[in-house]
Image (cartoon, rainbow, N blue to C red):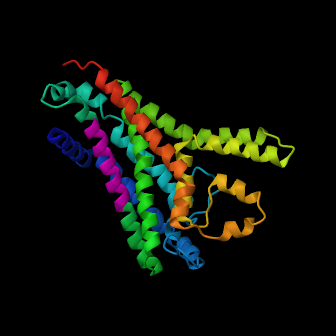
Amino acid sequence: MSTFFTVTKKELQDHFNSWRFMVLLFVILAAITYIFFAAGNIKSAATGASDFIFLSLFTATAIQTSTSLIPSSFLSLMAVLLPVAGIILGLDAINSERNNGTLSRLVSQPIYRDNIINAKFTAGIITIAIVLLTIVLLVSAMGLRMLGVPPSIEEIWRLFFFLVIGIIYGGFWLGLAILFSTLFKQVAVSAIVTIAVWLFFVVFYPIIYISIANMISSSTQAEAIKNAEMVINLTRLSPIQLFNESMAVLLIPQMRSASQLLQIFSTDAGNYLLTTPLSLAQSLIAVWSQITISIVLTTVCFALSYIKFMFEEIRSL
């Protein structure tokens, strides 16, 4: 266990003493700059909110855009920046060590092989947690100055779960980057493939399920609900959609998940159910399936890279 902590400490030092730190610093500055330039729109949106004013700092539409590729709120910005942080931390985790010849020297030491890859993943998760916590604290400090209203206890808890789910979301992209770093020998190839997967879910996958939704025709209400459920299930194959939906429900108490909206529209009390804020426990229950799927996807990516790394042959150069 002591070797695990030693390797983890070494990986953390590498993250903050290399070019990766500049990228992570860019992620932090991008989030803060976004809030700074959107301060006017966020303040007006928060002024119009009667409840959960502090959370509107993270959820209000700050920039009006004509395209979905440009983030319009802090939440959508995080859906773009967290994958960048995860990919940067994991894209050369294994193959750079192999190409430089340091991996063979590392495994020749009295260090269990699984400690190496476990430490790399743990160090990446810790780094993502530090970056995300820094962003939330800085944005909260700016919010206190702009809004002059401190967060309530429930808002603090909702922001805590925002941190937890954000770390899981970043951990998925970290695990995916480590997986491709284990599968491919060249750093450039693993980076290109990982970025291609990210661009697919950001740009092309929404086009796919929107096209499917437009092609489906429904003659009855039952068929319409069934087709809508199918499209919702398709959207939840995307980790970005899972993050967006779970965060929206947690940070906007009046928000409902897509599945809940289908159930509400089929009842007579729809208007009441849509305007009544959910408690924190109810919000967590509403997005528990999304959180579970995100954890499963992250676990699968890391498990595959773990198995590949444990059984591959490592030769000295």
Q: Quadrant of the C terminus?
A: top left
Residue 113, placed above or below residue 144? above
Q: Position of residue 246 (x, y in %)?
A: 54, 54
Residue 213, placed above or below residue 192? below
Tell me the quarter of the picture where residue 270 sits: bottom right
**Which residue is located at x 71 percent, y 54 percent?**
262
Magenta part of the protein: which range?
118-134
Residue 150, placed above or below residue 21? below
* Residue occupying the far right of the picture: 219
Q: Position of residue 275 (x, y in %)?
A: 67, 70
Q: Is residue 43 magenta?
A: no
Q: Is residue 119 magenta?
A: yes
* Towards the viewer: 94 or 293: 293
Q: Is residue 216 left or right of residue 41?
A: right
**Which residue is located at x 28 percent, y 30 percent?**
96
Q: Position of residue 165 (x, y in %)?
A: 44, 53
* Residue occupying the far bottom of the picture: 148
Q: Is residue 73 visible?
A: no
Number of numbered tags placed on the structure image: 0
